[in-house]
Amino acid sequence: MQQQCTLKLLPAEAASPEKVQQYAASHFGIPVSAISGFHILKQSIDARSRQPWILLTIRVFMHEPFHERTIQQLVLRDVSKAPQKVIVVGAGPAGLFAALKLIEEGIQPIVLERGKDVRARRRDLALLNKEGVINPDSNYCFGEGGAGTYSDGKLYTRSNKRGDVNRILNILVQFGADEKILYDAHPHVGTNKLPQIITAIREKIIDCGGLFLFEKKVTDLIIKDNIIKGVVTASGDSFDGDAVILATGHSARDIFALLHRKKILIEAKPFALGVRIEHPQSLIDSIQYHCPTRDAFLPPASYSLVQQVNERGVFSFCMCPGGIIAPASTDAGELVVNGWSPSKRNNPYANSGMVASVEMPDIAAWIKKAGGKIPVSVQDPLSAMYFQQSVEQKAFQYGGGKFVAPAQRMADFTQQKVSTTLPDCSYLPGLQSAPLNEVLPDFIYTSLQGAFREFGKKMKGYFTNDAIVVGTESRTSSPVRIPRHPENLQHPQIARLYPCAEGAGYAGGIVSAAMDGERVVAEFVKIR
């Protein structure tokens, strides 16, 4: 017999299978010997009181043999000689899961990735971190696995509105992720483990007869009678397909420009922009767990903050406990930062994006204030992208070059005071003390200025000069939307062109991007 129960345990108790079984036996009023084992169905932390608790929902096997957890397995076909082919542009989460879904449906995917495989990509990241030299096609945003490869592997999405979350998590486990992601309330894979998982997915795609090609940057689309027929790459190669899935990510500005140049409908859209803030992890632990030292059986603490300032939303984004701030730029002369964590989250710092919303009236005001100095109109679908780019260029200038980032201590930031010294920071290219109020647009700066003080009231000790503010966090989402028909998910103007995931404005994270990749394939299958 199998039954479920929820237990409230001390961290050390939750970490002991023997203790869990004892409490389960007490819950059901049976001897411990009657329990052969259990599966964890959900695990979360309740840290509202001074004593943090672990909440475990488990399935208990009583009076019957214990069975290991069943992992849903993909049923993949040999598609090497499939009559239909679909071109997948981009090998991030959306592109990879779209390719797997195509193989499930007996369709050959042709995956074209502008960057390099994860192993070769590491060398380019090292060059960026140590010498300030960037490869525009191989960096933290571009390359096998996309931006998610080096962005912690957070899997926080719990909504099933756009697909089956559990299916995505099961597939990740099938390819090497820890089973904990199936039940953790805030699952993550870890940047150190993602490359092996992504490599395993790529190898499976190739084993099944799919094509997977690196350093194939798409530079043109082959369109006839408003139907997409294929793509052309920078090397001059052309690829034909029965459809094209555009899964290029939120930083592929050249793709947005290509669509605009070919008069293919795109739209400017709101996004969020701000900074990345870093505290000592020990400080965040003490605030969140209400104790001077974190219990060894508790994970490094995280936080989620949101505040309305002058009717504008300010919120934490991509919070990385035990993490590292990294340069996420894609071009020379532009400075972007992001954060990531290893699977153990055991670095001494906690960082998070802290951003404010950028709405279209803000873009219009920016253009008007420029008084004709900016060659873009309010109606231009690339206007939000140009605004984003202008902030990144200013941040690069204030950093002084080689992706050194402008920074301030937190209290100094709110007082418009250039910090005389900066605390230690995980950002490898280095920091330059600078007035971030001159880097950020006024409405972003004033929103953050007010929010930081309010966050200090919500988390006692958060507002401190021991924290450092680093500019700029600007790639929270795409500043461009590529429209698609709500029923068949094709572009309304170009048949069989499927805009997909973050780069098209329809997802926000690994799981939602993966689900969107599967969704567009499901729609193509209906009409093939």
Image: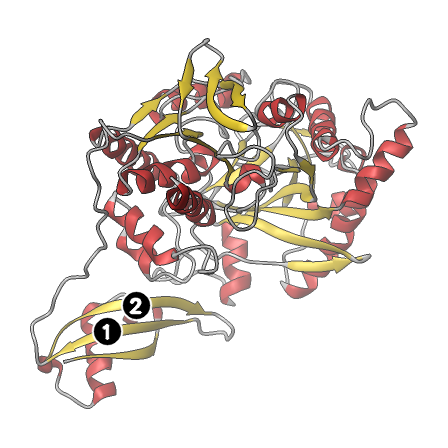
Q: Position of residue 347 (x, y in %)?
A: 43, 43
> In the rendered picture of this protein, how many numbered marks are placed on residues?
2
- What residue lies at 29% left-to-right and 53% top-to-bottom? 170
Q: Position of residue 293 (x, y in %)?
A: 45, 60
Checking the image for residue 295, the label placed there is: none
Q: Residue at x 35, y 66 (%)?
A: 43
Q: Residue furthest top?
A: 236
Return the x and y of residue 178 as percentages of the image width and height.
Answer: 28, 50
Image side of residue 198 versus residue 1, left or right: right
Q: Position of residue 504 (x, y in %)?
A: 57, 38
Instruction: Say which of 392 and 432 sits in front.
Output: 392
2 or 1: tag closer to the N-terminus = 2
Q: For mark 1, what is the residue?
A: 59
CB under 8 Å between discs 2 and 1: yes
Q: Is residue 90 above or below residue 290?
A: above
Q: Is 32 left or right of 204, judged from the image as shown? A: left
What amino acid does circle 2 point to? Leu
> Residue at 50% of width from left, 27% of height from top?
228
Q: How is the image coloured?
A: secondary structure
Q: Nearer the viewer, residue 510 or 493?
A: 493
Q: Which residue does the numbered mark 2 point to in the structure image?
A: 41
Q: Is residue 287 above or below residue 173?
A: below
Residue at image point 80% right, 26% down = 376
Tell me the quarter of the image containing the N terminus: bottom left
